[in-house]
């Protein structure tokens, strides 16, 4: 049961990273995404397939042969959409004019590490190989290549990428390059030898071992690598804090990226956009270099949102939006009371339901006449 | 970044009907969710019916009188429901008020029939798995009746206040839309609960 949750969880960690990578790759390749539709469809199929391969964590528990075959096949199958994504990103960079700023370096590091993790993943998807390396350092190496490569490196790139938008100041490019190279070398030094240690039979989850079994030198090397990785993160933290105080002031669009967040000031105003932008492409700031096309006509003295048609996004309504209200909070309190009380008496479902209903009616009751205006 | 106005939306209406209103999509999504819930409980019922040698295990199927009266009342309510929907779409305030009061009364009548129906199930919820699933299915459908009745009563009161205008007419139409879901989901459940045990 743990792995029914645990395996999709790995992909839940990974999926936001693919969005970050896609944003950074497009911004620094100076061209739209290659194979956008294929990329989106493969993301969806990864999300779907991730629920059907968790049993590969339990290959040595004595599964029926059909189960082992099925979950080997599904585990190998997920490499296809993941590979397709990697090829889409590589093709985007290949056909663009790539600029190697720090966020892009972390994305390139992600390709390098994650592809190795993916390859060892295809290896351990096969039952005989998995039986051999089960509970050894090979698996520790594999999971760190997938998760540090797949989630941490894109996340670090994303911090460098959006830091100026969030804080109004750029992070130091020089320190960032130091961080990237130290992290890349430190990570590989720390985790690559674990593949070999695992193949030499070193089990997982041990804190010590007898000398002379042939693991000593590589483990010393791993420790040095981990230290380097740690130092790179100390530099990263220092870079963040120093840049927050005295980093270079960021323009609205310091990377010349094409998506909407770069049209507002850095940091953005609380209302984001004074007027709703009209978007004609996936990188609207590249198609509209001089000025941003916007919609006028929404009320300036009451909250209104623009409702559009579903597929064409043609504006169809100016709908009133509610003002701040305490009612949702009271509804949350009522739900809490009803749920906790229902542990002690089933009647709490009845009177709790009435209580929740009362708070919901209070919530939805119109507060101001402009909310139901003609 | 500088902006230039390319479109003026000040002439757009502030509310719409059916798929033009965001509430309609919320209602449709809610129907999908709850419809899935009904499919799940019906599948559970059928599974239990298949694995048990006798169905119902108690030997006595639930009574037909109140459930059939309720089914007839539900089907008949489609007509005033459609009137309420149309009066909302015409933004006809007097007719909407009348139809919502009528639909509230019908809702209470149906709830009373449902209460009688619960007394003739011939099984308690804690007797066996059959009793549990029958009570769950009937309880789930009753929750929907109560939800829509609550909505109808609140809207009926609302239409007699200063808020009885504009967007609220669209809400009347969506509320009627949801009542159709309550009617339509009941028909297969009625066959399942009352005629599968008589097969």
Image (cartoon, coloured by chain):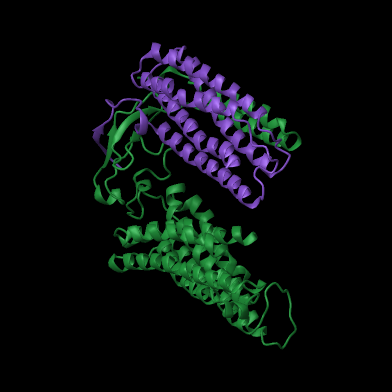
Chain colours: A green, B purple
Residue A358 location, x and y as percent?
60, 23
Residue in the picture at 54% in, 41% down: B38
Which residue is nearer to you in this view: A256 or A368? Answer: A368
Residue A270 location, x and y as percent?
44, 37
Q: Is residue A221 visible?
A: no
Which residue is nearer to you in this view: A167 or B55? Answer: B55
Q: Is residue A157 left or right of residue A310?
A: right
Locate the N terminus of chain A and report the quarter of the image it occupies.
bottom right
Where A61 sits versus A236, above or below? below
Residue A252 location, x and y as percent?
36, 47
Q: Is residue B128 visible?
A: yes
Residue in the picture at 35% in, 61% down: A38
Residue A45 location, x and y as percent?
44, 60
Q: Is residue B91 left or right of residue A158?
A: left
Q: Is residue B156 left or right of residue A216?
A: left
Residue in the picture at 39% in, 17% down: B165
- The image quadrant of residue A84 is bottom left
Q: Is residue A136 left or right of residue A278?
A: right
């Amino acid at each position: 049961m743990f792995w029914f949750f645990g395996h999709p969880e790995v992909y839940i960690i990974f999926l936001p990273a693919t969005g970050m990578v896609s944003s950074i790759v497009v911004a620094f390749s100076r061209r739209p995404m290659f194979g956008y539709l294929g990329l989106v469809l493969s993301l969806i199929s990864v999300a779907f397939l991730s629920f059907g391969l968790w049993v590969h964590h339990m290959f040595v528990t004595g599964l029926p042969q059909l189960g082992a075959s099925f979950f080997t096949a599904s585990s190998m199958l997920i490499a296809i959409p993941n590979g397709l994504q990697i090829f889409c990103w590589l093709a985007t960079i290949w056909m663009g004019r790539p600029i190697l700023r720090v966020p892009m370096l972390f994305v390139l590091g992600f390709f390098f590490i994650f592809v190795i993790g993916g390859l060892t993943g295809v290896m351990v998807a096969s039952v005989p190989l998995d039986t051999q390396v089960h509970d050894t350092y090979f698996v520790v190496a594999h999971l760190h290549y997938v998760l540090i490569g797949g989630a941490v490196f894109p996340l670090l790139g994303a911090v460098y990428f959006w830091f100026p938008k969030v804080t109004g100041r750029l992070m130091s490019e020089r320190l960032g390059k130091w961080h990237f190279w130290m992290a890349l070398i430190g990570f590989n030094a720390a985790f690559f030898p674990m593949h070999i240690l695992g193949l030499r039979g070193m089990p997982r989850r041990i804190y010590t071992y007898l000398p002379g079994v042939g693991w000593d030198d590589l483990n010393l090397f791993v420790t040095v690598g981990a230290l380097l990785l740690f130092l790179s993160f100390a530099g990263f933290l220092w870079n963040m804090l120093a840049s927050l105080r005295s980093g270079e002031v960021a323009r609205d669009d310091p990377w010349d990226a094409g998506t909407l967040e770069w049209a507002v000031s850095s940091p953005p105003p609380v209302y984001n956009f004074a007027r709703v932008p009209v978007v004609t492409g996936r990188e609207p700031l590249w198609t509209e270099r001089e000025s941003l096309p916007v919609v006028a006509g929404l009320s300036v003295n009451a909250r209104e949102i623009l409702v559009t048609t579903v597929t064409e996004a043609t504006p169809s309504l100016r709908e009133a939006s509610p003002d701040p209200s305490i009612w949702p909070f009271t509804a949350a309190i009522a739900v809490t009371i009803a749920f906790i009380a229902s542990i002690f008496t089933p009647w709490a479902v009845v009177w709790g339901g009435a209580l929740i209903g009362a708070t919901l009616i209070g919530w939805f009751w119109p507060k101001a006449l402009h909310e139901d205006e003609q | 970044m500088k902006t230039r106005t390319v479109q003026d939306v000040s002439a757009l209406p502030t509310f719409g009907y059916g798929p033009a209103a965001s509430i309609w999509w919320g209602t449709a999504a809610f129907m999908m969710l709850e419809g899935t819930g009904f499919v799940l409980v019906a599948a559970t019922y059928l599974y239990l019916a298949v694995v048990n040698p006798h169905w119902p295990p108690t030997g006595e199927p639930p009574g037909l009188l109140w459930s059939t009266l309720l089914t007839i009342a539900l089907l008949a309510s489609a007509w005033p429901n459609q009137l309420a929907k149309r009066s909302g779409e015409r933004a006809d305030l007097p007719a909407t008020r009348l139809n919502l009061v009528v639909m509230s009364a019908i809702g209470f009548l149906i709830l009373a029939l449902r209460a009688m129906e619960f007394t003739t199930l011939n099984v308690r919820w804690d007797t066996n798995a059959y009793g549990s699933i029958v009570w769950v299915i009937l309880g789930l459908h009753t929750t929907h009746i109560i939800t829509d009745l609550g909505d109808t009563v609140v809207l009926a009161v609302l239409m007699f206040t200063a808020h009885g205008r504009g967007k609220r007419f669209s809400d009347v139409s969506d509320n009627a839309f949801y009542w159709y879901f309550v009617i339509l989901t009941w028909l297969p459940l009625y066959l399942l609960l009352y005629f599968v045990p008589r097969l």
